[in-house]
Image (cartoon, rainbow, N blue to C red):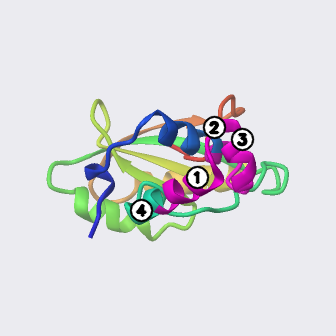
Amino acid sequence: MSDSRSITLDEIDRQLIALLQINARESVATLARHLGIARTTVNSRLERLEKNKVISGYGVRLGQSVIGGGLQAYVGIKVQPRSGKDVVRRLSAMGQVQQLCAVSGEFDYVAWLRTDSPEQLDQLLDQIGSVDGVEKTTTSIILSSKVDRGQPL
């Protein structure tokens, strides 16, 4: 099975991916025109990028107004030694945890949270803080998005 770590991306691949991040529904003809290459070349490159899992899927991102004006926040989470597995399992069960990443630096994990209200965010932060093994959390509420290429972290 192919793996995205074993594929070499050239400048055209990077430009194609950047265009798709802006609009994943863009037509092959328009992509080809922007890149100055043939449509068949775009199709071949898309097929190769998908086959090698560089592109793992296409989806819909809802605008903040559709979500109901909810809150989004990032939470840095520091855990006690050897508690990581249990903490990840518990956080994975919380529906408002949209993404959880292991990171280097002051924190062991960073979680991306989405709630409907400040009260729900407060309750969720209390839940996270009470998970066995969680030592410390630091929360940053997202005020506005300045650049969004489709990936939260």
Nearer the observer, 136 or 144: 144
Mark toward the start of the polypeptide (1 vs 2): 2
Which residue carries the number 1 mark? Answer: 42
Provide residue 118's location: percent of width, then percent of height.
70, 47
Rendered residue at 29%/59% (across/down): 3
Nearer the observer, 95 or 30: 30
Provide residue 27's location: percent of width, then percent of height.
74, 55
Which residue carries the number 3 mark? Answer: 33
The reply to whether dot 1 and dot 2 touch (C-beta < 8 Å) is yes
Which residue carries the number 2 mark? Answer: 35
Which residue carries the number 4 mark? Answer: 91
Callout 4: helix, strand or loop?
Answer: helix
The reply to whether dot 1 and dot 4 touch (C-beta < 8 Å) is no
Mark toward the start of the polypeptide (1 vs 3): 3
> Please, is residue 98 above or below residue 92 in the view?
above
Mark toward the start of the polypeptide (3 vs 4): 3
Callout 3: helix, strand or loop?
Answer: helix
State how far apart marks 3 and 4 are (Cα): 45 Å
Main SS of the magenta segment?
helix
Q: Is residue 108 left or right of residue 15?
A: left
Mark toward the start of the polypeptide (1 vs 4): 1
User: In the rendered structure, which segment of residues is drawn in magenta?
Assistant: 20-47
State how far apart marks 1 and 4 are (Cα): 40 Å
Locate the N terminus and report the quarter of the image it occupies: bottom left
Quadrant of residue 145 in the image?
top right
State how far apart marks 2 and 4 are (Cα): 42 Å
State how far apart marks 1 and 2 are (Cα): 9 Å
The reply to whether dot 2 and dot 3 touch (C-beta < 8 Å) is yes
| Three-letter residue code for mark 2 | Leu
